[in-house]
Every structure is written in C-alpha cells, then in structure tokens.
Amino acid sequence: MAQRLPMRDLVAKYRTSGPRYTSYPTALQLRPMDEAEYRQYLASASERTDDPWSLYVHVPFCEQRCTFCACAVVATPARERVSMPYTEALLAEADLVGAEIRDRRGLAQLHLGGGTPTYLEPDTLRLLGSGLLTRFEAAADMEFSVEVDPRVTTEAHLDVLAELGVNRVSAGVQDLDPTVQSLIGRTQPQAQTRGLVEGCRARDLGEVNIDLVYGLPGQSVRTMMRTVDAVVSLQPDRLALYGYAHVPWMRGNQKSIDESKLPGPDARLEMFLAARERLTAAGYVAIGLDHFAKPEDSLARADRDGTLHRNFMGYTVQPCTDLLGLGVTSIGDVGGALVQNTLKLSRYGDAVRNGRLPVERGFERSSVDRLRGRVISDLMCRHRVDKAEIEHAFGIDFDDYFGVELERLQPLRDDGLVHTSRDALVLTDVGRPFVRNAAMVFDAYLGGNKTQRHSSTV
C-alpha cells in the first residue's frame, strides 16, 4: 500500500470547484415553473399530515452590501419604507401556502435568514415571528433559528427573539481584523460581537453559531488565527468556516475588490488547515464540509449517531420531509420538487398582493435524481453509503449500476480517503474533509462549467 500523502498535499491535490450539495440536483438545474405546478407539489406535501417539515423565511435587506457578499440581498438604509410592506407580503404568502398545505402539522424547523432579519425594526420582527407561529402548528421541540448581524442587532431585537422563543442564533462575523474589514466594507469591532453573544446568553436564547470566512482580501494565516482565537474565546456552540468564492462575473459588487489583495490558493490552503487545527485543538468536532461544534451540541451528537441531515439551510438535525420557502428568491424542497420564488422584489410583492403564489422556477426530481441524491446525501451526512439500503430502496445492484463511478473513485481509494467493500462505501476519517470530491463522482449534472458556477472545495 502506498504511503499516504500529508494532509496539506491531499488538499492541494483535490482542490477543485464543485457544489455544496444542499440539494441534488443543485439550483443550477431550475427551469421556469408556474403556479399550477407548484400547487400540485404543495398538495402532495399536504398529504403527509404528521411528517415533520421545515420553513425558511428570507428577509433580503441589509443597510449596505458588503463587497464580498454573494447572497440574495437588497441593500437600502430606508428601513421604514421597506420593512412593514415586506413583512405584510411575507405573511400574505404564508396565508397562501397555509391554505394549500391545510392541516400539515409538526413544523420542526423555522429559520429566518437573509440578508439580515434583524434589519427589521423590533416591533416588525415581532409581528413577523408571531404571525408565522400563529399560522403554522409548531412541534414541541421546534428549532427556531435566526440569522443576526451584530452591527444592527439591538437589545430590543434580542428581547423580541427571546419573547418569540428563538433557540438558536447565527451571527455573521466573517473576520475581526480591521484591515480585512475595511477591504470588505464591513466594520464590526470585536466588542460588538462579544456584546451580541453575551446578550444572547443573558436571555437564554439557546445556542449561538458564528460564521467565519477565509480567503478574503487582506487575510493571512496570522490574521485568520487571531480571528479564530478571538471567536473561540466567546465559546460559540457551533462555528462555520466558509471559503470565499470570488465570482465578480456573477456578483457585481465583488468587482470593487482589489484582486491583488486576495490570498492565493496556497495561502487559502494554509488558512483552512491552520483554522481547522486550531478549532479541533480547542475541542470542537469537525462536521461535514465546514462546520465545527462542541461535542455536546446536537449537531455533533447527530454526526456521531448517523442522523445528520442537510437542506438549503445547511446541516441540520431535523429529519424533515418537506422544506417550504417564503420570501423573494427563497428555495423550497416540496413534494419531491425544488421550487424557487421570483428573484425580483417588485414581482414578489405584486404576486402575493394579488393572491398568487410567487413561484418562478423549479425542478421535479426523476427516479434517477432521487437515487443519486440519496447516495450524495448519505456521503454528506453519514460519511458512508450502505449498498444494501440503496439496493432495497431503488431496486438496483449497486456495484453494477455505479460501476463507472466506483472506478472514478479509485484515486480517492489509493490516497486513503475512501474505503469500499462488498457492503459499503465509507469516507475514512482522513477523507471526510474531501466529501465534496466523493459526492461529485455521483453527480450526473456536472459539466465543464463547474469552475465558473461553483465554489472551491478549499
């Protein structure tokens, strides 16, 4: 057996671009979809009366757009002009969707994302949260999570979140170095972040997540480690470590970034490895692509138990059969189909005011999509594929059906990243950071444009 390459060499060897697999197929396959089609998928979802389900609500607004941002954001400082009309539109869409899914119970996961949900004034945020809880029947153990921006989140916002029963807060930090912050248009003093975390804990707002980004302009291993150490000192329950994707041809705001300030591939690799080593040394468990959690966190427990799940919100412990999306640009996974709302704020408002579901694009999975999606999901969440389970569920002979794919996995086997046997396909401990590389082998939609449309694996 060949000697295993050092981790640094493995990461350099397998660095490529590819999907993050929050769905399969990915959103790149979405096509035009009309309201009648969407209603059919909602009707299918409504039949699973007692199955747990998830609800994602997109609040797109930020006071200003960070130069690195690739999210669906509407940047405007005019809160009083947009907050209430948009909140009313969201609740109107909730009424439309609620009429279609009728008696669907067991809302297991409610997530307000953005943009910045705490861009809304506290009273407006209360109206939105209470309106959603009134319209949909929550499970007793529902996870209610909200993304917050420490720069605009006030004590009054935190009071509202506690009043609504929020039990997970996700704070965007990205980087704490002042020079890096100036280059990405995001001034966020460390004391501001600490104040937010302390405010959440004082109100018993459950678990706190912090998001970091590596590969930003002006970053170095030294500055990245200072940020990691500062964040670890706050003892968040989970951290996410995302690689910055520089795609100015897709996101015009990134054109203002001085590309000479961007760290190169080798520097990005050093940041990733150093941050990963520092976080694991601090006691965090590495989970999936880019998440780290305290050993007692529910995400870490699900990872150990093999009950981790993944949807458009990332890794989750909730085994939901449907994910409904509300708001402009939001994507759902409903009745076996991917469904996305209109991308334009004006069209979204016009649709719901006129009693129409604001759907614009979608994709119905085929039986082959469901098969390949199951394999990819098992790799992403369980780190293994049980061949007998797949054969029983889909009526295939695994080794015969995926003969070409198993051959394409040979380099990963040779490097000790994947182990295959008669019964299973397993990511080794060393191979887990390379799960995207293994999953891409089973993706029937990947083409020559993946470098332009997907983020780097490191």
Image (cartoon, rainbow, N blue to C red):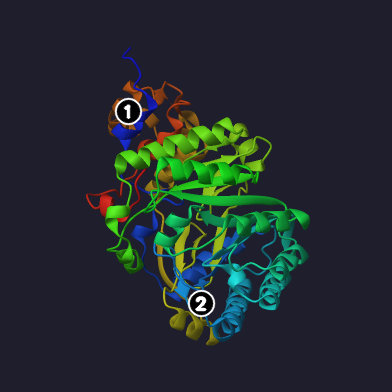
Residue 421 horizontal/vertical position (percent): 42, 21
Nearest the viewer among 83 and 448 is 83
Q: What's under tag 2, amino acid-wise?
A: Leu
For mark 1, what is the residue?
A: 9
Spatial CA distance of label 1 from label 2 is 50 Å
Quarter occupied by the C terminus = top left
Q: What's under tag 1, amino acid-wise?
A: Asp
Q: Residue at x 34, y 44 (%)?
A: 443
| In this picture, residue 187 sits left or right of residue 416 | right
Residue 4 horizontal/vertical position (percent): 35, 19
Residue sitting at the far top: 1
Quarter occupied by the N terminus = top left
SS for callout 1? helix
For mark 2, what is the residue?
A: 357
Nearest the viewer among 85 and 200 is 200
Residue 162 horizontal/vertical position (percent): 75, 62
Residue 338 horizontal/vertical position (percent): 45, 60
SS for callout 2? loop
Q: Residue at x 61, y 50 (%)?
A: 209
